[in-house]
Amino acid sequence: AQSVAQPEDQVNVAEGNPLTVKCTYSVSGNPYLFWYVQYPNRGLQFLLKYITGDNLVKGSYGFEAEFNKSQTSFHLKKPSALVSDSALYFCAVREATGFQKLVFGTGTRLLVSP
Amino acid sequence: DAMVIQNPRYQVTQFGKPVTLSCSQTLNHNVMYWYQQKSSQAPKLLFHYYDKDFNNEADTPDNFQSRRPNTSFCFLDIRSPGLGDAAMYLCATSSSPGLQETQYFGPGTRLLVL
């Protein structure tokens, strides 16, 4: 079965510094990977996805993610963090069989300090 | 702007009193999903509609039902809410269930059971 792991419950970074939120995946077949962000008391907002092609995927709000097949990772990155980036981030993978539903990681809380 | 709308944003109900949550979309997407999310955990898929075809997750309690009267609207009915059903309920849509398709989420309805 497809799965993703987010090894860090929380990531702390100072405003202006680069940020990385980690995600590793386990799939049979080709991976279809997604990142979502959730602000307090809000729904999930789509940031970006990897389907095929370039390993560096650019998304919304200046975020990007690097797909690494050998390390089975899909880390979310941003060159310069903003306080407003503080939120809960979910990595997800699409199941390759059956209905092909989204399988979410446990989430990583990002806290950007001024 | 095309979007996913959920009403109400906050819902308070009493233990055992039926409640209905509403979702509408202007994206004209074929698939609509309902997720349950507790305490910043990963969203858990309850069921989805692909057009008029209803698909229930195996572990979704019978207490949860859904209706999709037309393409734009989908309802979540909780027949006899228990204290454990207090959660954020997220509606999402996608144009198809394919591997590459992005799911777009509404802002969620937070349910409180007294």
Image: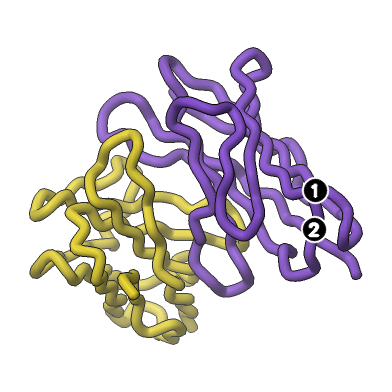
Chain colours: A purple, B yellow
Q: For this rendering, which residue is in front, B61 or A74?
A: A74
Q: Would you place residue B5 above or below residue A74 in this image?
A: below
Residue A19 shows which numbered tag? 1
Q: For this rendering, which residue is in front, B96 or B84?
A: B96
Q: Would you place residue B2 above or below residue B10 in this image?
A: above
Q: Chain of mark 2?
A: A
| Placement of the N terminus of chain B among the 4 image quadrants | bottom left
Q: Chain of mark 1?
A: A
Q: Horizontal placement of A11 versus B67: left or right?
A: right
The local crowd at label 2, few if under 14, some if 14 to 19, many if 20 or more residues have their Cα within 10 Å, is many
> What whole-number distance in Å separates the C-alpha atoms at marks 1 and 2?
6 Å
Name which residue lies at 33% across and 43% down: B101
Residue B43 coordinates in the image, percent (x, y): 49, 53
Residue B29 coordinates in the image, percent (x, y): 21, 58
User: Does residue A24 appear anywhere in the picture?
Assistant: yes
Q: Would you place residue B73 above or below residue A87 in this image?
A: below
Labels 1 and 2: the sequence-earlier one: 1
Residue B32 coordinates in the image, percent (x, y): 25, 57
Q: Horizontal placement of B48 versus A8: left or right?
A: left
Q: For this rendering, which residue is in front, A21 or A56?
A: A56
Name which residue lies at 35% across and 37% down: B100
Residue corresponding to mark 2: A81
Residue type indicated by callout 2: Ala
The local crowd at label 1, few if under 14, some if 14 to 19, many if 20 or more residues have their Cα within 10 Å, is many
